């Protein structure tokens, strides 16, 4: 039974903020699991358990698939899996808040590129200055691999935002996740499964990975999909500006990662850049997913 009034009564920014906190909490909680089965192994376990949880909540609507839906679903599934894999590989090497700030360059870049105002392109440059302050390369201790993984995660994050909105427009609720999270698990299996097999699979690893998966991808990605259905890319990208600050906060509270004064200044620049990148509200035309007649996924169908 659909209850559109319930969803529309909750401000989209509140679901987005809850999702951001959930994502950063799950990333921090993943660190002990990474120590046991590696970053790729942890990401793969999260996707596998996440697919199972989502299937319990919302069965995949295979019968409603149209041929033109498939590319977006596959791309979203792949970038979801590797966004998590690359980011956990970064967190394995650099502090959580720094990794989030670097990764944030991806969606911030998308928000600036999709903006109609050319001056919006200055904000990724400001965020880049903030990232330099965060990484403190003059200290000589910068982890290039960690930075590289965070940048790769950022590219995936930017694509994730674009395709999440597209898929969210087509499928109601979190039914889109029931199709994309299994794709994410399959896409990352070649990297994650070997690490799980060769790692230290102690008794608590699987329950821990299952609990983290319930937070992200199930709850967090579901909330993001709901938020993106009701917001523009630029409005969502602007709201994401506070996520690096959330990364610093969760890193401090959960992982005891204390930033320096210079790094706090860097985070402030990143947040300022994100907040200034674009201002916008709800999407101009908010349409519920259309219940179109499915086109069979067979050769010769249009």
Image (cartoon, rainbow, N blue to C red):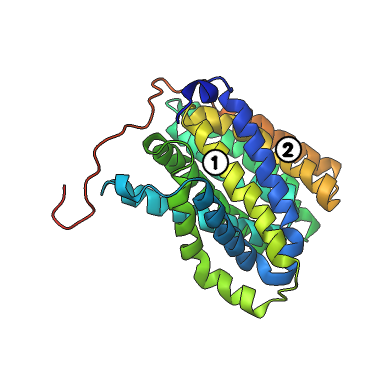
Q: CA distance from mark 1 to mark 2?
A: 22 Å
Q: Is residue 280 visible?
A: no
Callout 2 crowding tier (Cα within 10 Å): few <14, some 14–19, many ≥20? many
Residue 79 point in image, percent of width and height: 48, 54
Residues 269 and 209: in front is 209
For the point 45% across and 29% down, the residue is 2
List the single residue furthest toward the front: 1
Q: Is residue 142 shown left or right of residue 17?
A: right
List the single residue furthest toward the bottom: 198
Q: Is residue 13 shown left or right of residue 37?
A: left
Quick one: label 1 or label 2, which is nearer the N terminus? 1
> Count of labels shown?
2
Residues 230 and 128: in front is 230
Circle 1 sits on which residue?
222
Query: Disc 2 on helix, strand or loop?
Result: helix
Q: Is residue 177 shown left or right of residue 72?
A: right
Q: Is residue 57 visible?
A: yes
**Where is 147 relative to 203, above or below?**
above
The picture quadrant where one finds residue 140 is bottom right
**Where is 17 relative to 69, above or below?**
above
Callout 1 crowding tier (Cα within 10 Å): few <14, some 14–19, many ≥20? many
Residue 263 point in image, percent of width and height: 79, 43
Residue 152 point in image, percent of width and height: 55, 56
Q: Quadrant of the N terminus?
A: top left
Residues 224 and 262: in front is 224
For the point 47% across and 28% down, the residue is 232
**Residue 46: image tag:** none
For the point 54% across and 41% down, the residue is 222
Circle 2 sits on which residue?
245
Query: Disc 1 on helix, strand or loop?
Result: helix
Residue 65 point in image, percent of width and height: 31, 47
């Amino acid at each position: 039974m659909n209850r559109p009034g319930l969803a529309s009564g909750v401000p989209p920014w509140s679901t987005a903020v809850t999702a951001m906190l959930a994502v950063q909490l799950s990333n921090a909680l993943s660190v002990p699991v990474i120590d046991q089965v590696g970053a790729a192994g942890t990401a793969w376990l999260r996707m596998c358990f996440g697919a199972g949880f989502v299937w319990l909540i919302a069965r995949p609507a295979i019968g409603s698939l149209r041929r033109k839906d498939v590319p977006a679903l596959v791309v979203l599934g792949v970038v979801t899996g590797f966004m998590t894999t690359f980011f956990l590989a970064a967190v394995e090497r650099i502090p959580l808040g720094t990794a989030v700030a670097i990764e944030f360059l991806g969606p911030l870049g998308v928000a600036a590129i999709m903006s109609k105002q050319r001056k919006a392109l200055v904000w990724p440059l400001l965020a880049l200055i903030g990232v330099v302050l965060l990484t403190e390369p003059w200290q000589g201790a910068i982890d290039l691999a960690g930075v590289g993984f965070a940048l790769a995660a950022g590219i995936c994050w930017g694509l994730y935002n674009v395709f999440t909105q597209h898929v969210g427009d087509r499928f109601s609720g979190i039914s889109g996740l029931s199709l994309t999270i299994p794709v994410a698990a399959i896409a990352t299996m070649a990297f994650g499964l070997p690490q799980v097999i060769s790692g230290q699979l102690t008794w608590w690893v699987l329950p821990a990975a299952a609990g983290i998966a319930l937070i992200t991808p199930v709850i967090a990605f579901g909330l993001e999909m709901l938020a993106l259905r009701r917001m523009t890319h630029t409005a969502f990208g602007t709201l994401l500006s506070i996520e690096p600050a959330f990364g610093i906060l969760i890193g401090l509270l959960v992982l005891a990662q204390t930033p320096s004064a210079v790094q706090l200044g860097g985070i402030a620049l990143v947040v300022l850049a994100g907040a200034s990148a674009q201002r916008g509200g709800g999407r101009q035309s908010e349409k519920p997913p259309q219940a179109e007649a499915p086109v069979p996924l067979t050769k010769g169908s249009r």
